[in-house]
Image: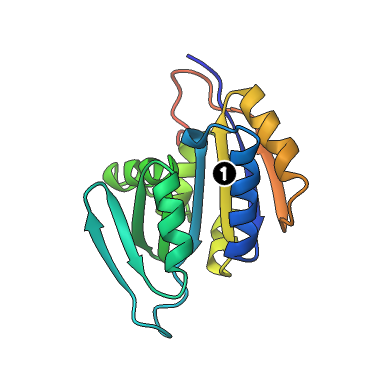
């Protein structure tokens, strides 16, 4: 079983997150390991709609061009309503991690379904709580999950972007052990 690491950067605006994604893509980072999540903060200000178009979700609203572009670029997309966070839009492998948390009915000491998904890939609980709080305050999470070499390459690119926080998480879940055993 291979060891996978994760780099997580937090951005104030979708424009900052989008620029970071473009830098990663330009420098050849594998988009299959990239995820993004952000709150749908515009539902009370604008008419917003979602619909399924084949294998992707379409989004109408203030940030429709951003999310439409992201959902076309990354693998997997979803819209969730997560207690404590609210409406959440996500794309990439993060979607599967959240769904696995929901399907497994995992409730882990004060973390959301998003948090349960992040715990499942070895991100420590204190960082998960920090990421839940970032989303609650309308920030965007950008994650790159992959081998140590892939994550190191992404880390070097993301360090030069205008993030508000930045962390690298080394795989800390030993093979055969559930990441939820201590929670």
Q: Quadrant of residue 68?
A: bottom left
**Left or right of 178 in this view: 2:** right
Check the image and report above or below for 134 versus 169: below
Evaluate whether residue 109 shows in this view: yes
Dot 1: few (<14), some (14–19), or many (≥20) neighbours within 10 Å? many
- At 71% from the left and 54% from the top, the residue drawn is 165
Check the image and report above or below for 62 versus 134: below
**Left or right of 102 in this view: 31:** right
- At 43% from the left and 29% from the top, the residue drawn is 178
Q: Position of residue 4 (x, y in %)?
A: 55, 25
Evaluate whether residue 86 shows in this view: no
Residue furthest out toward the top: 1
Q: Nearer the viewer, residue 160 or 174?
A: 160
Residue furthest out toward the front: 26
Q: Position of residue 107 (x, y in %)?
A: 38, 49
Residue furthest out toward the bottom: 45
Q: Quadrant of residue 3?
A: top right
- At 58% from the left and 49% from the top, the residue drawn is 142
What residue is pinned by disc 1?
A: 143
**Left or right of 6 in this view: 65:** left
- How many numbered circles does the render carry? 1
Secondary element at image label 1? strand
Q: Position of residue 83 (x, y in %)?
A: 39, 65
Q: Position of residue 138 (x, y in %)?
A: 56, 69
Q: How is the image coloured?
A: rainbow
Q: Nearer the viewer, residue 3 or 79?
A: 79
Q: Nearer the viewer, residue 138 or 54?
A: 54
- At 74% from the left and 57% from the top, the residue drawn is 162
Q: Quadrant of residue 159?
A: top right
């Amino acid at each position: 079983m291979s060891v996978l690491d994760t780099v997580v950067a937090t951005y104030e605006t979708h424009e900052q997150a989008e620029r970071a994604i473009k830098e990663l893509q330009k420098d050849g980072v594998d988009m299959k390991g990239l995820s993004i999540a952000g709150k749908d903060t515009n539902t009370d200000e604008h008419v917003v709609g979602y619909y399924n178009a084949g294998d992707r979700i379409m989004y109408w609203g203030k940030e429709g061009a951003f999310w439409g572009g992201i959902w076309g670029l990354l693998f997997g997309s979803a819209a969730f309503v997560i207690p404590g966070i609210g409406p959440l839009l996500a794309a990439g492998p993060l979607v599967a991690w959240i769904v696995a948390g929901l399907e497994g009915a995992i409730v882990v000491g004060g973390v959301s379904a998003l948090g349960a998904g992040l715990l499942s890939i070895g991100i420590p609980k204190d960082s998960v709580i920090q990421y839940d709080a970032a989303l609650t305050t309308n920030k965007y999470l950008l994650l790159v999950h992959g081998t140590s070499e892939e994550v190191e390459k992404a880390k070097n690119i993301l360090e030069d972007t205008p993030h508000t926080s930045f962390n690298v998480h080394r795989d800390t879940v030993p093979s055969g052990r559930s990441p939820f055993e201590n929670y």
